[in-house]
């Protein structure tokens, strides 16, 4: 099933056309993007997070690892949002009704962003879901997790960003 999910995402990203997916490495600046939040507000990154560390999470509702990890991220977010930690959960390739139904079911409180055409995912070089980037307050990628992770992994990366 995991291979099926990865294959679906690869096809989805490839269907975007244009240039190939980026290869985003640690130490690279996080690519800027504009999109819409699930609540309808416009989102412009990095302006929306100026001076704050950010967790950028790519996910989809069909990804069996995404649901438990999004709940784990919520726990870390609640623990550190008062210290300035931001979380942006970017849905790759699904429409707003599907995203909304999944988020209502999960009950997460961090911002959910729409990427219906997977253009942002492609700019970030996402080749599998879930994929999470940890970006420091200066907009530099300091960590990356591809695939399954737990609360302890998110906590460790968040604490590194908050130093």
Image (tube, rainbow, N blue to C red):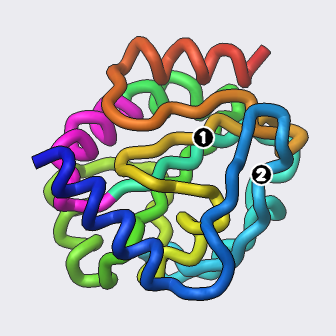
Side (left or right) of 27 relative to 132: right
Q: Secondary structure at mark 1?
A: strand
**Is 161 or 118 nearer to us in this picture?**
118
Disc 1 to disc 2: CB gap under 8 Å: yes
- Rendered location of residue 120, percent (x, y): 59, 70
The residue where tag 2 is placed is: 30
Secondary structure of the magenta portion, mostly? Answer: helix
| Residue farthest left in this picture | 1
Side (left or right) of 151 relative to 7: right
Q: Secondary structure at mark 2?
A: loop
Q: How many marks overall?
A: 2
Disc 1 crowd rating (10 Å Cα; few below 14, some 14-19, many 20+) is: many
- Rendered location of residue 129, percent (x, y): 36, 50
**Is 109 or 7 nearer to us in this picture?**
7
Side (left or right) of 35 relative to 117: right
The residue where tag 1 is placed is: 133
- Rendered location of residue 23, percent (x, y): 69, 51
Residue 158: in magenta span: no
């Amino acid at each position: 099933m995991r291979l099926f999910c990865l294959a679906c995402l690869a096809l989805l990203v490839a269907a975007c056309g244009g240039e190939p997916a980026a290869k985003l490495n640690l130490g690279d600046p996080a690519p800027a993007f504009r999109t819409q939040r699930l609540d309808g507000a416009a989102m412009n990154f990095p302006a929306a997070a100026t001076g704050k560390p950010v967790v950028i999470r790519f996910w989809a509702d069909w990804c069996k690892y995404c649901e438990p990890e999004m709940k784990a991220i919520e726990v870390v977010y609640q623990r550190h949002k008062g210290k300035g930690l931001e979380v942006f959960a970017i849905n790759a390739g699904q429409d707003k009704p599907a995203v909304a139904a999944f988020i209502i079911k999960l009950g997460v409180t961090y911002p959910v962003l729409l990427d219906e055409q997977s253009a942002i995912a492609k700019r970030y070089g996402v080749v599998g879901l879930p994929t999470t980037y940890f970006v420091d307050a200066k907009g530099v990628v300091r960590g990356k997790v591809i695939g399954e992770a737990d609360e302890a992994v998110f906590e460790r990366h968040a604490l590194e960003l908050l130093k």
